[in-house]
Amino acid sequence: MRAIPLSYVMRNLWVRRVTTVLTAGGMSLVVFVFATVLMMSEGIKETMVATGQPDNVIVLRKGSGTEINSAILRTQASSLEALPGIATDSEGHRLLARETVVLNNLPKRDSEDTANVTMRGTTQIGLGIRPQVKLVQGRMFRPGTSEIIVGQAVAKGFANISLGSTLMMAGREWTIVGIFDAERSGFDSEIWADSDTVTQAFRRSVYSDIIFKLNTIEAFPAVAKAIADDPQLQLDVKLERRFYADQSEGMTRFITLLGLSLSVIFSIGAIVGAMITMFAAVASRIGEIGTLRALGFRKEAVLLAFLGEALGLALVGGLVGLAGASAMQSVNISTLNMATFSELAFRFKLTWVVSIETMAFALLMGFLGGFVPAWRAGQLSIIECLRQA
């Protein structure tokens, strides 16, 4: 089968450039929504997964699921400290931290709204086993004092957050002595303080979690088995990275389903627009179709030519929409972490997978919008074309 030259297809798109721009513009808006939803999901995954270290282990109360809902007794914490496989520092101290995690409601910087912020009571060891967390201003809090350090996302998103400022929480004043950068992980959206001070101030008699570093990642199965076999512990144990990845799944699933549902609804309008455009192109070029058939081009070649025009429209719209979505990577936003009900800052992330899925979605819209008009063009006979020309 002799194919109609691609130059013919592209020329027709250029000749009808106003219609091409309008139709492709509608598609690009749908593609923009589709791509930003996928980028949002990727950004949340990146933020949550980056929060955990591959050789860190987090221990929670069995069935709790989150640090906020967890409770670990002091006797249980002491038993965990005796487990084999926990790494030690140069002085022989075990790299294990007892942590207390609570929520505080703080005012947002640019609005009158308030939002929950996670406050983590930890230790110098807790900071040390999370190498992505680095102080960029000020200093570390002193144990036993009401001093706090805040993540960069908290400093940017909430009011009255700066070095030397004080926050009123749990009936006492907390002084901000440092600001840390956690490399776009979930810790950027937290406030850190001394574990014992937080436990006392918030009247907690238990810890929220125990975090420790393994000698080697291969030691994890033995550690997990030792905890599971001890009937007095009744605790869940996970690798820290797996724990935060699990927390992101519910959020990304909800955002993806909601966004894709909206994209499908919007795409119906874009498909109808492309279909109308292609039907109009067929109606206005009856004579051309007859000439092509008279020159020996078969029905399939005509169908493919018009379908190629529809896919060309979709390709232009997809590239424009994807380019607009890529600009969103410079935007940092925050949302509610549905696992902890606290604020979580993240960024949009464009990946090759997102790009491929976005362009495939755009081409699918073009195919659905162009196939019926293209099939109609291919079914026209030479005599019918001459009669209607």
Image (cartoon, grey):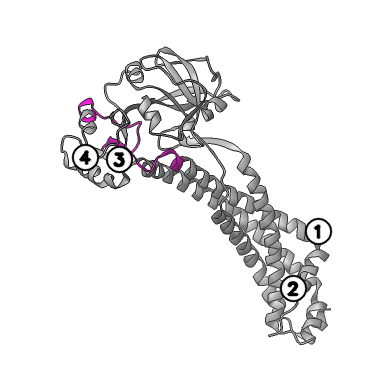
Residues rendered magenta in the picture: 48-77
Of the numbered discs in the image, which one, if any, rests on residue 18? Answer: 1
Residue flagged by tag 1: what amino acid is it? Val
The C terminus: image quadrant: bottom right
Q: Is residue 70 magenta?
A: yes
Mark nearer the N terminus (2 vs 3): 2
The N terminus: image quadrant: bottom right
Q: CA distance from mark 4 to mark 2?
A: 67 Å
Question: In the image shown, does 213 or 327 lie closer to the viewer?
Answer: 213
Query: In the image, is 306 to the left or to the right of 61?
Result: right
Query: In the image, is 336 to the left or to the right of 70?
Result: right
Of the numbered discs in the image, which one, if any, rests on residue 212? Answer: none
Mark nearer the N terminus (4 vs 2): 2
Q: CA distance from mark 1 to mark 3?
A: 65 Å
Q: Do residues under tags 2 and 3 come within 8 Å of each other at their CB atoms? A: no
The image shows residue 364 at horizontal and vertical percentages of 60, 64
Q: Do residues under tags 4 and 2 come within 8 Å of each other at their CB atoms? A: no
Mark nearer the N terminus (2 vs 1): 2
Of the numbered discs in the image, which one, if any, rests on residue 227? Answer: 4
The image shows residue 81 at horizontal and vertical percentages of 24, 31
Residue flagged by tag 3: what amino acid is it? Asn
Query: In the image, is 388 to the left or to the right of 31?
Result: right
> Which one is in front in this view, the residue at disc 3 or the one at disc 4?
3
Q: CA distance from mark 2 to mark 1?
A: 20 Å
Q: Do residues under tags 3 and 4 come within 8 Å of each other at their CB atoms? A: no
Q: Residue at x 20, y 35 (%)?
A: 233
| Residue 101 visible in this rendered orientation of the protein | no
Q: Which residue is mark 2?
A: 6
Mark nearer the N terminus (1 vs 3): 1
Of the numbered discs in the image, which one, if any, rests on residue 215? Answer: 3
Q: CA distance from mark 1 to mark 4?
A: 68 Å
Q: Is residue 373 magenta?
A: no
